[in-house]
Image: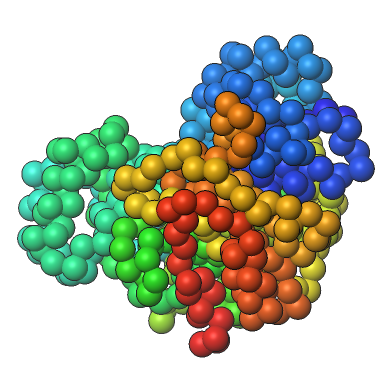
Protein backbone atom coordinates (compact mmCIF):
# COMPACT_ATOMS: atom_id res chain seq x y z
CA UNK A 1 0.00 0.00 0.00
CA UNK A 2 0.97 3.65 -0.45
CA UNK A 3 1.10 5.87 2.65
CA UNK A 4 1.31 9.66 2.95
CA UNK A 5 2.54 11.24 6.21
CA UNK A 6 1.81 14.95 6.75
CA UNK A 7 4.39 16.92 8.74
CA UNK A 8 8.08 17.76 8.89
CA UNK A 9 9.44 17.20 12.41
CA UNK A 10 10.93 14.57 14.68
CA UNK A 11 7.48 13.17 15.44
CA UNK A 12 6.84 12.61 11.74
CA UNK A 13 10.28 11.00 11.32
CA UNK A 14 9.38 8.59 14.15
CA UNK A 15 6.02 7.84 12.48
CA UNK A 16 7.67 7.29 9.08
CA UNK A 17 10.26 4.99 10.71
CA UNK A 18 7.45 2.87 12.18
CA UNK A 19 5.49 2.85 8.91
CA UNK A 20 8.63 1.72 7.05
CA UNK A 21 8.74 -1.40 9.24
CA UNK A 22 5.30 -2.52 8.06
CA UNK A 23 5.44 -5.32 5.48
CA UNK A 24 2.14 -3.98 4.13
CA UNK A 25 3.68 -0.71 2.94
CA UNK A 26 5.36 -0.46 -0.48
CA UNK A 27 5.81 3.30 -0.78
CA UNK A 28 5.90 6.22 1.67
CA UNK A 29 5.50 9.91 0.84
CA UNK A 30 5.95 12.73 3.35
CA UNK A 31 4.72 16.31 2.93
CA UNK A 32 6.81 18.34 3.39
CA UNK A 33 9.23 16.05 5.30
CA UNK A 34 12.86 16.81 6.14
CA UNK A 35 16.38 15.62 5.31
CA UNK A 36 16.19 12.60 7.62
CA UNK A 37 12.75 11.50 6.49
CA UNK A 38 14.05 11.62 2.90
CA UNK A 39 16.07 8.44 3.57
CA UNK A 40 12.82 6.47 4.07
CA UNK A 41 10.16 8.39 2.15
CA UNK A 42 9.78 10.53 -0.93
CA UNK A 43 9.46 14.07 0.37
CA UNK A 44 6.96 16.32 -1.38
CA UNK A 45 7.14 20.13 -1.32
CA UNK A 46 3.58 20.67 -0.07
CA UNK A 47 2.92 22.45 3.23
CA UNK A 48 0.90 20.77 5.98
CA UNK A 49 -1.81 23.46 5.72
CA UNK A 50 -2.18 23.24 1.92
CA UNK A 51 -5.18 20.92 2.11
CA UNK A 52 -6.28 21.20 -1.53
CA UNK A 53 -2.78 20.42 -2.81
CA UNK A 54 -2.47 17.48 -0.41
CA UNK A 55 -5.81 16.06 -1.55
CA UNK A 56 -4.84 16.46 -5.22
CA UNK A 57 -1.51 14.74 -4.54
CA UNK A 58 -3.18 11.87 -2.66
CA UNK A 59 -5.54 11.31 -5.57
CA UNK A 60 -2.82 11.58 -8.21
CA UNK A 61 -0.57 9.05 -6.43
CA UNK A 62 -3.50 6.82 -5.41
CA UNK A 63 -2.56 7.03 -1.72
CA UNK A 64 -4.23 4.28 0.32
CA UNK A 65 -3.75 5.81 3.76
CA UNK A 66 -2.78 9.26 5.06
CA UNK A 67 -1.40 9.90 8.56
CA UNK A 68 -1.51 13.47 9.89
CA UNK A 69 1.20 14.11 12.46
CA UNK A 70 0.85 17.81 13.21
CA UNK A 71 -1.64 19.72 15.35
CA UNK A 72 -2.26 22.72 13.05
CA UNK A 73 -3.75 20.76 10.10
CA UNK A 74 -5.80 18.56 12.46
CA UNK A 75 -7.30 21.56 14.27
CA UNK A 76 -7.76 23.21 10.86
CA UNK A 77 -9.93 20.33 9.60
CA UNK A 78 -7.67 18.38 7.23
CA UNK A 79 -9.38 15.08 8.13
CA UNK A 80 -12.79 16.45 7.16
CA UNK A 81 -11.38 17.62 3.81
CA UNK A 82 -9.79 14.23 3.06
CA UNK A 83 -12.87 12.27 4.13
CA UNK A 84 -15.12 14.45 1.95
CA UNK A 85 -13.01 13.32 -1.01
CA UNK A 86 -13.32 9.65 -0.05
CA UNK A 87 -9.71 9.40 1.14
CA UNK A 88 -8.76 7.22 4.14
CA UNK A 89 -7.03 9.33 6.77
CA UNK A 90 -5.85 8.84 10.37
CA UNK A 91 -6.58 11.64 12.84
CA UNK A 92 -9.48 13.41 14.54
CA UNK A 93 -11.99 15.49 12.62
CA UNK A 94 -12.04 19.24 13.24
CA UNK A 95 -14.87 19.07 15.79
CA UNK A 96 -12.86 16.52 17.83
CA UNK A 97 -9.42 18.13 17.40
CA UNK A 98 -10.83 21.06 19.40
CA UNK A 99 -9.81 18.95 22.40
CA UNK A 100 -6.34 20.37 21.74
CA UNK A 101 -7.33 23.41 19.70
CA UNK A 102 -9.12 25.12 22.61
CA UNK A 103 -7.93 24.86 26.20
CA UNK A 104 -11.13 26.59 27.30
CA UNK A 105 -13.18 23.85 25.57
CA UNK A 106 -11.17 21.05 27.14
CA UNK A 107 -11.39 22.57 30.63
CA UNK A 108 -15.15 23.01 30.30
CA UNK A 109 -15.44 19.41 29.07
CA UNK A 110 -13.54 18.11 32.10
CA UNK A 111 -15.67 20.15 34.47
CA UNK A 112 -18.92 18.96 32.88
CA UNK A 113 -17.93 15.28 32.94
CA UNK A 114 -16.12 15.31 36.32
CA UNK A 115 -12.70 14.45 34.87
CA UNK A 116 -10.00 15.39 37.44
CA UNK A 117 -8.18 18.62 36.55
CA UNK A 118 -7.02 21.87 38.16
CA UNK A 119 -9.54 24.55 39.12
CA UNK A 120 -9.76 27.31 36.49
CA UNK A 121 -11.62 30.24 34.92
CA UNK A 122 -11.82 31.32 31.26
CA UNK A 123 -11.43 34.97 30.19
CA UNK A 124 -11.94 36.94 26.98
CA UNK A 125 -11.55 40.38 28.62
CA UNK A 126 -8.05 41.22 29.96
CA UNK A 127 -9.48 43.62 32.57
CA UNK A 128 -11.66 40.86 34.02
CA UNK A 129 -8.63 38.56 34.09
CA UNK A 130 -6.59 41.21 35.95
CA UNK A 131 -9.39 41.72 38.48
CA UNK A 132 -9.61 37.95 39.07
CA UNK A 133 -5.87 37.75 39.74
CA UNK A 134 -6.15 40.26 42.61
CA UNK A 135 -7.82 37.59 44.75
CA UNK A 136 -6.08 34.51 43.29
CA UNK A 137 -3.53 32.34 45.08
CA UNK A 138 0.04 32.39 43.74
CA UNK A 139 1.76 30.74 41.94
CA UNK A 140 -0.78 30.54 39.14
CA UNK A 141 -0.85 29.30 35.54
CA UNK A 142 -1.92 31.33 32.49
CA UNK A 143 -2.71 29.50 29.24
CA UNK A 144 -3.38 30.91 25.80
CA UNK A 145 -6.54 29.15 24.61
CA UNK A 146 -5.35 28.15 21.13
CA UNK A 147 -2.33 26.45 19.56
CA UNK A 148 1.01 28.06 20.46
CA UNK A 149 3.64 25.46 19.52
CA UNK A 150 3.64 24.10 23.07
CA UNK A 151 4.78 27.48 24.43
CA UNK A 152 1.54 29.30 25.31
CA UNK A 153 1.70 28.49 29.03
CA UNK A 154 3.08 30.88 31.64
CA UNK A 155 3.75 29.88 35.26
CA UNK A 156 3.61 33.05 37.37
CA UNK A 157 5.01 33.12 40.92
CA UNK A 158 3.86 36.63 41.87
CA UNK A 159 0.87 38.88 41.18
CA UNK A 160 3.11 41.22 39.17
CA UNK A 161 4.30 38.34 36.99
CA UNK A 162 0.70 37.24 36.47
CA UNK A 163 -0.42 40.74 35.45
CA UNK A 164 2.47 40.96 33.01
CA UNK A 165 1.45 37.53 31.69
CA UNK A 166 -2.08 38.76 30.96
CA UNK A 167 -0.61 41.65 29.00
CA UNK A 168 1.74 39.29 27.12
CA UNK A 169 -1.00 36.84 26.11
CA UNK A 170 -4.13 38.99 25.71
CA UNK A 171 -2.88 42.49 24.84
CA UNK A 172 0.55 42.09 23.22
CA UNK A 173 -0.71 38.89 21.54
CA UNK A 174 2.67 37.17 21.83
CA UNK A 175 0.95 33.92 20.78
CA UNK A 176 -1.26 35.60 18.17
CA UNK A 177 -4.97 34.78 18.09
CA UNK A 178 -4.31 31.85 20.42
CA UNK A 179 -4.48 34.50 23.17
CA UNK A 180 -7.95 35.87 22.32
CA UNK A 181 -9.25 33.69 25.14
CA UNK A 182 -7.12 32.83 28.17
CA UNK A 183 -7.43 30.17 30.87
CA UNK A 184 -6.29 31.03 34.40
CA UNK A 185 -5.64 27.80 36.26
CA UNK A 186 -4.58 26.82 39.76
CA UNK A 187 -0.95 25.71 40.02
CA UNK A 188 -0.56 21.98 40.61
CA UNK A 189 2.52 20.29 42.04
CA UNK A 190 3.72 16.74 41.47
CA UNK A 191 5.36 14.60 38.81
CA UNK A 192 4.35 15.20 35.21
CA UNK A 193 3.68 12.16 33.04
CA UNK A 194 2.65 11.92 29.37
CA UNK A 195 0.42 9.07 28.23
CA UNK A 196 -0.40 8.51 24.55
CA UNK A 197 -3.41 6.51 23.43
CA UNK A 198 -5.06 5.19 20.28
CA UNK A 199 -8.81 5.89 20.02
CA UNK A 200 -11.46 4.77 17.52
CA UNK A 201 -14.36 6.91 18.75
CA UNK A 202 -15.43 4.54 21.50
CA UNK A 203 -12.52 2.25 22.43
CA UNK A 204 -9.23 3.53 23.86
CA UNK A 205 -5.93 1.62 24.02
CA UNK A 206 -3.15 3.08 26.13
CA UNK A 207 0.44 3.23 24.87
CA UNK A 208 3.44 3.23 27.17
CA UNK A 209 3.96 6.23 29.48
CA UNK A 210 6.63 8.86 28.91
CA UNK A 211 8.05 11.91 30.64
CA UNK A 212 8.98 15.18 28.93
CA UNK A 213 11.49 17.91 29.78
CA UNK A 214 10.02 21.24 28.59
CA UNK A 215 12.49 23.80 29.96
CA UNK A 216 15.45 24.82 27.82
CA UNK A 217 18.19 24.44 30.43
CA UNK A 218 19.43 21.86 32.92
CA UNK A 219 17.61 21.64 36.22
CA UNK A 220 14.34 22.68 34.57
CA UNK A 221 15.58 26.25 34.22
CA UNK A 222 15.07 28.61 31.31
CA UNK A 223 12.19 29.13 28.91
CA UNK A 224 9.52 26.62 27.92
CA UNK A 225 10.29 24.81 24.66
CA UNK A 226 8.56 22.24 22.50
CA UNK A 227 10.48 19.61 24.49
CA UNK A 228 14.21 19.06 25.09
CA UNK A 229 14.07 15.32 25.70
CA UNK A 230 11.98 12.44 26.91
CA UNK A 231 12.07 8.98 28.41
CA UNK A 232 9.71 6.00 28.41
CA UNK A 233 8.33 4.40 30.49
CA UNK A 234 7.96 6.71 33.48
CA UNK A 235 8.80 4.92 36.76
CA UNK A 236 6.25 7.19 38.44
CA UNK A 237 3.39 5.85 36.31
CA UNK A 238 2.52 2.94 38.59
CA UNK A 239 -0.11 0.21 38.23
CA UNK A 240 -2.28 2.13 40.71
CA UNK A 241 -1.99 5.35 38.69
CA UNK A 242 -2.84 3.44 35.51
CA UNK A 243 -5.94 1.87 37.03
CA UNK A 244 -7.16 5.24 38.38
CA UNK A 245 -6.63 6.98 35.04
CA UNK A 246 -8.37 4.26 33.03
CA UNK A 247 -11.42 4.55 35.28
CA UNK A 248 -11.62 8.30 35.84
CA UNK A 249 -9.72 9.96 32.97
CA UNK A 250 -9.11 7.93 29.79
CA UNK A 251 -12.42 6.23 29.02
CA UNK A 252 -14.44 9.14 30.50
CA UNK A 253 -12.71 11.52 28.06
CA UNK A 254 -13.56 9.32 25.07
CA UNK A 255 -17.14 8.91 26.30
CA UNK A 256 -17.46 12.67 26.93
CA UNK A 257 -16.37 13.54 23.39
CA UNK A 258 -18.83 11.00 21.99
CA UNK A 259 -21.64 12.39 24.17
CA UNK A 260 -20.87 15.89 22.85
CA UNK A 261 -21.30 14.68 19.26
CA UNK A 262 -17.55 14.92 18.69
CA UNK A 263 -16.38 11.28 18.49
CA UNK A 264 -12.60 11.19 18.60
CA UNK A 265 -10.57 9.00 16.23
CA UNK A 266 -6.79 9.14 16.31
CA UNK A 267 -4.29 9.75 19.10
CA UNK A 268 -5.15 11.45 22.38
CA UNK A 269 -2.15 12.63 24.37
CA UNK A 270 -2.91 12.95 28.07
CA UNK A 271 -0.62 15.33 29.95
CA UNK A 272 -1.00 14.29 33.59
CA UNK A 273 0.10 15.73 36.93
CA UNK A 274 0.48 13.18 39.70
CA UNK A 275 -0.67 15.33 42.63
CA UNK A 276 -1.10 14.46 46.30
CA UNK A 277 -4.83 14.27 45.55
CA UNK A 278 -4.31 11.80 42.72
CA UNK A 279 -3.68 12.13 38.96
CA UNK A 280 -5.16 15.19 37.23
CA UNK A 281 -5.22 16.28 33.58
CA UNK A 282 -2.84 19.14 32.72
CA UNK A 283 -3.66 19.16 29.01
CA UNK A 284 -4.88 17.16 26.06
CA UNK A 285 -3.22 16.96 22.67
CA UNK A 286 -4.93 15.52 19.60
CA UNK A 287 -1.84 13.80 18.15
CA UNK A 288 1.44 12.12 19.07
CA UNK A 289 3.64 14.24 21.29
CA UNK A 290 7.01 15.46 20.07
CA UNK A 291 9.40 14.09 21.36
CA UNK A 292 7.10 11.53 23.06
CA UNK A 293 6.62 9.73 19.74
CA UNK A 294 10.40 9.27 19.51
CA UNK A 295 10.53 7.17 22.71
CA UNK A 296 7.14 5.41 22.55
CA UNK A 297 6.95 4.27 18.91
CA UNK A 298 10.36 2.49 18.86
CA UNK A 299 9.04 0.35 21.76
CA UNK A 300 5.75 -0.63 20.08
CA UNK A 301 5.56 -4.24 18.90
CA UNK A 302 2.49 -3.87 16.68
CA UNK A 303 2.43 -2.94 13.01
CA UNK A 304 1.47 0.75 13.22
CA UNK A 305 -0.64 0.51 10.05
CA UNK A 306 -2.74 -2.31 11.56
CA UNK A 307 -3.42 -0.21 14.67
CA UNK A 308 -4.20 3.02 12.83
CA UNK A 309 -6.51 1.30 10.34
CA UNK A 310 -8.35 -0.33 13.23
CA UNK A 311 -8.90 3.15 14.71
CA UNK A 312 -10.30 4.51 11.44
CA UNK A 313 -12.49 1.43 10.93
CA UNK A 314 -13.87 1.49 14.49
CA UNK A 315 -12.46 -1.91 15.46
CA UNK A 316 -9.68 -0.98 17.85
CA UNK A 317 -11.14 -3.44 20.38
CA UNK A 318 -9.73 -6.24 18.18
CA UNK A 319 -6.13 -5.00 18.58
CA UNK A 320 -3.84 -6.36 21.31
CA UNK A 321 -1.55 -3.34 21.73
CA UNK A 322 1.88 -4.43 22.97
CA UNK A 323 5.18 -2.77 23.88
CA UNK A 324 8.66 -4.14 24.42
CA UNK A 325 9.72 -4.71 28.03
CA UNK A 326 12.52 -2.19 27.66
CA UNK A 327 13.08 1.57 27.87
CA UNK A 328 13.94 4.48 25.58
CA UNK A 329 15.51 7.90 26.11
CA UNK A 330 15.56 10.80 23.63
CA UNK A 331 17.94 13.75 23.98
CA UNK A 332 17.18 16.73 21.72
CA UNK A 333 20.13 18.40 20.03
CA UNK A 334 19.06 22.00 19.52
CA UNK A 335 20.52 25.17 18.03
CA UNK A 336 21.99 27.31 20.80
CA UNK A 337 19.61 30.19 21.49
CA UNK A 338 16.45 28.10 21.01
CA UNK A 339 13.60 28.83 21.71
CA UNK A 340 14.29 32.55 21.11
CA UNK A 341 16.86 33.27 18.38
CA UNK A 342 19.30 30.95 16.63
CA UNK A 343 21.19 30.57 13.37
CA UNK A 344 20.48 27.93 10.71
CA UNK A 345 22.37 26.36 7.83
CA UNK A 346 25.24 24.63 9.65
CA UNK A 347 26.39 21.28 8.15
CA UNK A 348 25.78 18.21 10.33
CA UNK A 349 28.25 15.31 10.47
CA UNK A 350 28.26 11.81 11.99
CA UNK A 351 25.02 10.26 10.70
CA UNK A 352 26.92 7.18 9.49
CA UNK A 353 27.47 6.07 13.11
CA UNK A 354 23.77 5.18 13.37
CA UNK A 355 23.73 2.91 10.33
CA UNK A 356 23.02 -0.76 11.01
CA UNK A 357 22.07 -0.19 14.65
CA UNK A 358 18.51 -1.10 15.67
CA UNK A 359 18.80 0.25 19.23
CA UNK A 360 19.94 3.76 18.28
CA UNK A 361 17.86 6.32 16.35
CA UNK A 362 18.64 9.75 14.97
CA UNK A 363 15.28 11.43 14.39
CA UNK A 364 15.48 14.63 12.33
CA UNK A 365 13.40 17.58 13.57
CA UNK A 366 14.86 20.71 11.97
CA UNK A 367 17.09 19.65 9.07
CA UNK A 368 17.25 20.35 5.32
CA UNK A 369 19.51 19.80 2.32
CA UNK A 370 21.64 22.74 1.18
CA UNK A 371 22.42 23.49 -2.48
CA UNK A 372 25.39 21.10 -2.32
CA UNK A 373 23.25 18.24 -1.01
CA UNK A 374 24.65 18.39 2.52
CA UNK A 375 22.33 17.98 5.50
CA UNK A 376 22.25 21.24 7.48
CA UNK A 377 20.45 22.64 10.53
CA UNK A 378 17.06 24.17 9.72
CA UNK A 379 15.32 24.78 13.05
CA UNK A 380 15.55 25.26 16.80
CA UNK A 381 15.24 21.58 17.61
CA UNK A 382 17.55 19.85 15.13
CA UNK A 383 17.80 16.16 16.05
CA UNK A 384 16.28 13.73 18.56
CA UNK A 385 18.98 11.26 19.57
CA UNK A 386 17.18 8.19 20.88
CA UNK A 387 18.38 4.89 22.28
CA UNK A 388 16.68 1.83 23.72
CA UNK A 389 18.04 -0.32 26.51
CA UNK A 390 17.01 -3.03 28.94
CA UNK A 391 16.14 -0.31 31.46
CA UNK A 392 16.05 3.48 31.68
CA UNK A 393 19.59 3.85 33.01
CA UNK A 394 21.06 1.85 30.13
CA UNK A 395 18.94 3.69 27.56
CA UNK A 396 19.99 7.04 29.03
CA UNK A 397 23.70 6.16 28.96
CA UNK A 398 23.41 4.99 25.33
CA UNK A 399 21.46 8.07 24.23
CA UNK A 400 24.04 10.44 25.73
CA UNK A 401 26.86 8.36 24.19
CA UNK A 402 25.20 8.80 20.79
CA UNK A 403 24.86 12.58 21.17
CA UNK A 404 28.63 12.65 20.71
CA UNK A 405 28.43 10.89 17.35
CA UNK A 406 26.90 13.87 15.55
CA UNK A 407 28.18 17.39 15.45
CA UNK A 408 27.24 20.81 14.12
CA UNK A 409 28.12 24.39 14.94
CA UNK A 410 26.08 25.86 17.89
CA UNK A 411 24.95 22.37 19.02
CA UNK A 412 23.17 22.57 22.37
CA UNK A 413 21.46 20.04 24.67
CA UNK A 414 20.37 19.44 28.22
CA UNK A 415 22.56 17.03 30.20
CA UNK A 416 19.94 15.87 32.71
CA UNK A 417 17.29 14.19 30.55
CA UNK A 418 15.96 11.27 32.56
CA UNK A 419 17.90 12.23 35.67
CA UNK A 420 14.66 11.62 37.60
CA UNK A 421 15.25 7.94 36.81
CA UNK A 422 18.02 7.93 39.40
CA UNK A 423 15.60 9.28 42.00
CA UNK A 424 12.81 6.75 41.34
Q: Quadrant of residue 44?
A: top right
Q: Quadrant of residue 387?
A: bottom right
Instruction: Depth check: give the residue in front, 243 or 340.
Output: 340
> Quick check: 251 left or right of 146?
right
On the image, the x and y values in percent for residue 57 come to 70, 15
On the image, the x and y values in percent for residue 27 come to 84, 30
Furthest toward the front, the residue is: 372
> Quick check: 150 left or right of 252?
left
Q: Quadrant of residue 368?
A: top right
Say above or below: 73 vs 416: above
Say above or below: 285 vs 394: above
On the image, the x and y values in percent for residue 150 come to 41, 49
On the image, the x and y values in percent for residue 377 come to 51, 42
Say above or below: 167 vs 208: above
Q: Residue at 64% of width from left, 61% of height from top?
A: 405
Q: If the image is split into quadrants, where does the N terminus sit?
A: top right
Can residue 252 be seen in the rendering of this structure?
Answer: no
Amino acid sequence: MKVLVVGSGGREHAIVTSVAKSPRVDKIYCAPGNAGIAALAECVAIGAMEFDKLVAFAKEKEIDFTIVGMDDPLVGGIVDVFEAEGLKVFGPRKNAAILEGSKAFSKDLMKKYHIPTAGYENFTDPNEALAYLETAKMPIVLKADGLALGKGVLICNTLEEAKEGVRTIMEDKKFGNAGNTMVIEEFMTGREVSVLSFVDGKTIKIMSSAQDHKRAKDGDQGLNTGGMGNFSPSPFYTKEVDEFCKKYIYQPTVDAMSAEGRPFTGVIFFGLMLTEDGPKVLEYNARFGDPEAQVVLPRMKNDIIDVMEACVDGRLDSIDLQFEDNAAVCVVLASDGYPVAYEKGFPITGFDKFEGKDDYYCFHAGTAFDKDGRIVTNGGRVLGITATGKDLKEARAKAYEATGWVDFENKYMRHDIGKAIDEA
